[in-house]
Image (spheres, rainbow, N blue to C red):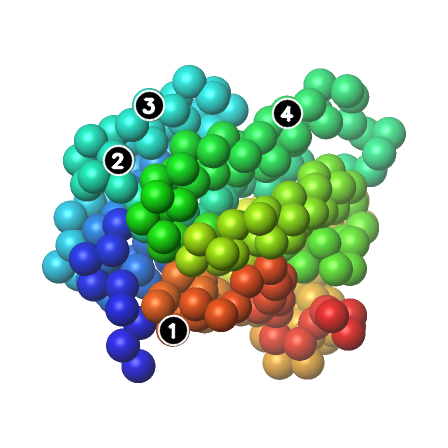
Amino acid sequence: MDFGLAGKVALVAASSKGLGLAVAQELAMEGAHLIMCARGVEALEKAAAEVESCGSGEVLALPTDLLNSAEISSLVDAAVSRFGHVDVLVNNAGGPPYGTFEDHPPEAWQAAVRLNLESALNLTRGVLPEMKERGWGRIINITSVAVKEPVDGLILSNSVRAAVTGFARTLANEVASFGITVNNVLPGFTRTDRLLQLAEAQSKQRGISTEDVENGWNSVIPARRLGKPREFAAVVAFLASERASYVTGVSIAVDGGRTRALY
């Protein structure tokens, strides 16, 4: 299937590792130009070299702190200066820390809102006007299956990612007539560094090995295994494509059947 992404310009946030890197690689393999960002310069440069080797498009890698709205503005300005516009925006950010409600002071809630909600708002605000002007755009938010079925111990993520879902669903209706789609992709248990950190946290809390934690996850996933980052990235690439022009306002779980919600 030709996704029609050759020559398109995609900005993938937090793309030096994990799901963000997998998405950048997948879009590069489809022929897209990439703008990548992350806080760590060394990791970002290494990731950008990997992505550039995946396809024929150009890669622009810019160190960016998604907690800083001025840096986000600079990122979007640099992307437009280099490529003229952004066709595809993939909003992504590292997950908030593990813990219960009483574990997190007000400052932790504020940081989670800034990282996972405000970064998506600021990036979207930066690219949306030109998408509307050109009559084409894809905005894709990487959230979590926690928005359909909250995960114990992840109260920050459960709460703030649900806010992103509400934002995206509303925006989808506002911009559909401009040829812009807005969708969410919800990773389940996928083998990334973030998941390994969660396994370690649960291991300490429950007094069991990380292997036992992973086996417990596998036992409740109908596919009986953790997901692979590229399996997740393939869904994002489809939603970014020309072929997905009539799909908007949806939240798609990529979780091996784990989420029991009907919609």
Q: Nearer the viewer, residue 87 or 143?
A: 87
The amino acid sitting under disc 3 is Ser
Disc 3 on helix, strand or loop?
A: helix
Q: Nearer the viewer, residue 17 or 11?
A: 11
Percent of width and height locating residue 183: 54, 57
Q: Are marks 2 and 3 in contact (CB under 8 Å)?
A: no
Q: Residue furthest left?
A: 56
Q: Residues within 10 Å of mark 1 (few under 14, many from 20)?
A: some
Q: Nearer the viewer, residue 244 or 62?
A: 244
Residue at x 51%, y 24% (from the top left corner):
67
Which quadrant would residue 118 be assigned to in this image? top right
Question: Mark 1 against mark 4, which lies toward the viewer?
Answer: 1
Where does label 4 land, which residue? 111
Where does label 2 land, which residue? 79
Q: Nearer the viewer, residue 62 or 256?
A: 62
Where does label 3 land, which residue? 74
Q: Are marks 2 and 4 in contact (CB under 8 Å)?
A: no
**Residue 243: mark in rendering:** 1
Could you tell which of marks 3 and 4 lies nearer the N-terminus?
3
The amino acid sitting under disc 2 is Ala
Q: Is residue 110 above or below residue 155?
A: above
Residue at x 80%, y 51% (from the top left corner):
152
Q: Residues within 10 Å of mark 3 (few under 14, many from 20)?
A: some
Disc 1 on helix, strand or loop?
A: helix
Disc 1/disc 2 C-alpha distance (Å): 25 Å
Percent of width and height locating residue 95: 59, 41
Could you tell which of marks 1 and 4 lies nearer the N-terminus?
4
* 55 left or right of 247 in image: left
Q: Is residue 70 above or below residue 169?
A: above
The amino acid sitting under disc 4 is Ala
Disc 3/disc 4 C-alpha distance (Å): 21 Å
Q: Quadrant of the C terminus?
A: bottom right
